[in-house]
Amino acid sequence: MSALIQNILIKVGQKKDRLLDILLSVQEAESFVSDENIKIIAGSLQLSEIDVRQCMSFYHFFSTKPSRHRIFLNDSVMANLMGGQKVKEAFEKVLNCKQGEINADGIGFYTTACIGMSDQEPAAMIDGVIFPSLTPERVRFVVEGINQGKSLSDLYYLPLGDGRNGGAALNTMVNSNIRKTGLLLDDYYKSGSALTIAIEKSELEVIGIVKTSGLRGRGGAGFPTGMKWEFCRSSEGAEKYIICNADEGEPGTFKDRVILTEKIEMLLEGMTIAAYAIGAREGIIYLRHEYQYMRQHIENALAVARTKKMLGNNILGKDGFDFDIRIQFGAGAYVCGEESSLIESMEGKRGEPRFKPPFPVQKGYHNKPTSVNNVETFCKVCRIIERGGEWYRRYGTKQSVGTKLLSISGDCPRPGVYEIEWGMTLYQMLEMVGATNTQAIQVGGPSGSLIGKTGFDRKICYSDISTGGSMMIFDQSRDLIKDVVLNFLEFFIDESCGSCLSCRACTQQIRNKLEKMIHGKGVSTDIEDLKKWAKFTLVSRCGLGQSAANPISTSIANFPHLYQAMVQKEKDYDTCFDLASAVADSCKVVNRVPNF
Amino acid sequence: MERVKFQIDNKDCEALYGQMLVDAARDNGVYIPTLCNMQDVKPCGSCRVCTVKVNGRYATACTTPVACGMEIESDTEEIHEIRKALIELIFAEGNHYCPTCEMSGNCELQALGYRFGMMVSRFPYQFPQREINTDCQHLIIDYNRCIRCKRCIRTIKDKKGKSYFAFINRGDKLEVTMDKEMAKTMPLKVAELAMENCPVGAILLKETAYRVPIGERRFDKKCIGSEIEETDVKVFMGELNNE
């Protein structure tokens, strides 16, 4: 066994369930995972080689080829809207290689799904460092610098970002872009105050307060937080886990990035309160790979919390209350934002969703009761414990209590994070961000809905249009079908775990048909087909599969004229068969020239 | 063990608490079509063909444990349409040429196609380029026919419990692959089991083929599922023969 692997196994643990960490550590040290290392890892974990490969190949950021540097350019809808295509061409030109290749200087160039920078696109990650607001000129500057052997931080073309982004631990050009603060983002938070209150109460009292507040999960699904904790607490088993879902992968959302940057202490404190309430001794932040630039920043916060006795044994002097938190990095898979996939991934497996029941609160991480909550949810808990459940109910609407952080991007002069009270209409939101001439809003990311003007009086809340926070604004100049819907479909096809036939195969059929229509070959029956086919994805196992056709079904419902425009008049039947090109193909095989 | 009462299509049924719906239905003489599922093997719910509605919500019968008072919809127009579409999706996704396939007549996919009265897939055939792998001394793996049901991954293991097969990649690039080293030493018995467990003709034994004569194949005379059902169902195969 090589010294490298040996050291990693000592550090991470020689266990199957740490496979993801082992692979990530190897890749970090050597820029790739070699066949040789795969063999060694498999041998030392009593796995077959193919077991290691099946885990690795599930995640986007693993490589089996060596490179000196790796560039991942975001190709999300937002990136393309902000000039991503030109930036991509610039990269391909200066690197002299295509997307997916490693150039002669050993620089790998890849595209990737939304990296959580929709407010400062086009953005790329170079060896984990974020390069936001790229232009072709900046691409040339950066790549030339890399070629001259300069360090990445010497190639910053913008001043360091606002807030804590400019600090030594983050040292990044990323901006937090907080545009509107509310009860979470306001400055009056004092570290430790909520936890001090919580541990003076009983565990059930803490859960009671959260239940009174009416707080619901902020990741998108909106499950009542207090109830989740109650279930988890009452599930059998002495060992329990608290997991923070920081896999923020829904394209267009970036509010968790901002919380992790600016309010990390609050998040850790919220997790600790949750641990106290359910009786967990171990907490894990599942952090998306794209946010690895925050590692030092979060590690520092953890260290400070430990010295302040807010983590560790006998927290704040409370006898027997032991709890600590570690970071678990993802490796690039959107579906891992689904809580059971996330747990699978944490156990070193492919991030395929589990069946429910049993739910994670019954059998989660290592089959122990586990509460998985969103970054924002944990922070809200701090506020609620500090000020009381009744106080929290004063914000928002009766059904949707409190505030919500929105990640607003696209065609508006002030993209960024806005903390609003639930119940705001989309009109009010557009006014708030200064958007004009708006054609559509994608609410809740690709898995949400594409809403047109007639829906702008709808309210942002759980009972009307619910959202995990992603809000993308498109003005009249945008081609919604080509630039938005098609990109979203591609996203789902790529990010599907592939296990469910309905999600894997049906989305491809829908994409193919839409492409055909975009190419002017649409017939009237195509629209009906798309509507029907979209329904077949609903039988998929997880939320990804069930919402994979939402881009199609909501855009057909709200923008029927755009589909009508793609249909050839008076043609309701299409053979999908192009005789001329078929003849050309077969002639090519036998080396003949078509005679018509 | 506690017994629970539930209903499938308004028929009163009884089963052991926690039994999976497909099994519970079978014990009550109700056939819920399955493809990826295997009796006594941990279900994986990948093909979705056993989709039913449980108290009004979609669920796969192979992964849903039965509970007291459940109301199941299975033999309805809506569910039938979904299942048929799923079968058609499989046919369109791979390259399934029944007439030349060794498993014709023994193939569960083909049998389901007949059962659902599928004439042609409503989805355009994708004609993917897939390989045929002969690395294993005993097996031919024809990926043209692989439906990614995970049966081989779940059941074909060596003495230490290591898998011979695994998924590789994800999404539209998802494939089943075989461990190259382990393939070389796969015992014949394991290879035979691999072929037997494959619901289609993707895993075939070398040096032997077409062993079962036409007329004696699994689905030559009986429709898939008919062994479970008490009374004869509308057999689409019959309807086709009359045409």
Image (spheres, helix red, strand yellow):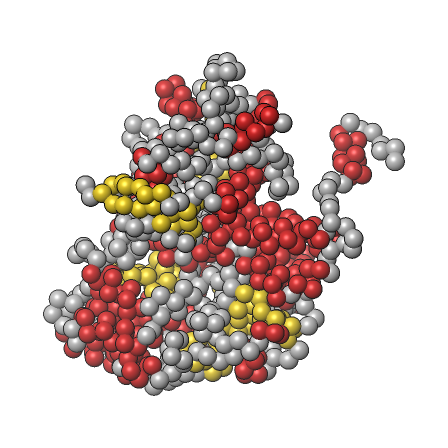
User: How far from the left and from the top, in percent, is residue B124?
Assistant: 64, 41
Q: Which residue does the image show at 66% across and 78% down from the upper left?
A: A437
Q: Quick check: A98 above or below B182?
A: below
User: How far from the left and from the top, in percent, is residue A315?
Assistant: 18, 71
Q: Can residue A273 be seen in this view?
A: yes
The mark tally for this picture is 0
Q: Quick check: A342 above or below B109?
A: below
Q: Say left or right for B146 vs A292.
A: right
Q: Quick check: A530 above or below B149?
A: below
Is B233 in front, or is B158?
B233
Q: Which residue does the image show at 61% across and 71% down from the upper left?
A: A452
Q: Say left or right for A92 vs B33.
A: right
Is A496 in front, or is A417?
A496
Q: Which residue does the image show at 21% across and 68% down from the upper left?
A: A276
* Quarter holding residue B30: top left
* Quarter holding residue A400: bottom left
| Outermost right residue | A595
Is A54 in front, or is B201?
B201
Q: Is residue A498 visible?
A: no
Is A526 in front, or is A546?
A526
User: How far from the left and from the top, in percent, is residue B116?
Assistant: 52, 36
Quarter of the N terminus of chain A within the rendering: top left
Quarter of the C terminus of chain A within the rendering: top right
User: How far from the left and from the top, in percent, is residue A118?
Assistant: 54, 68
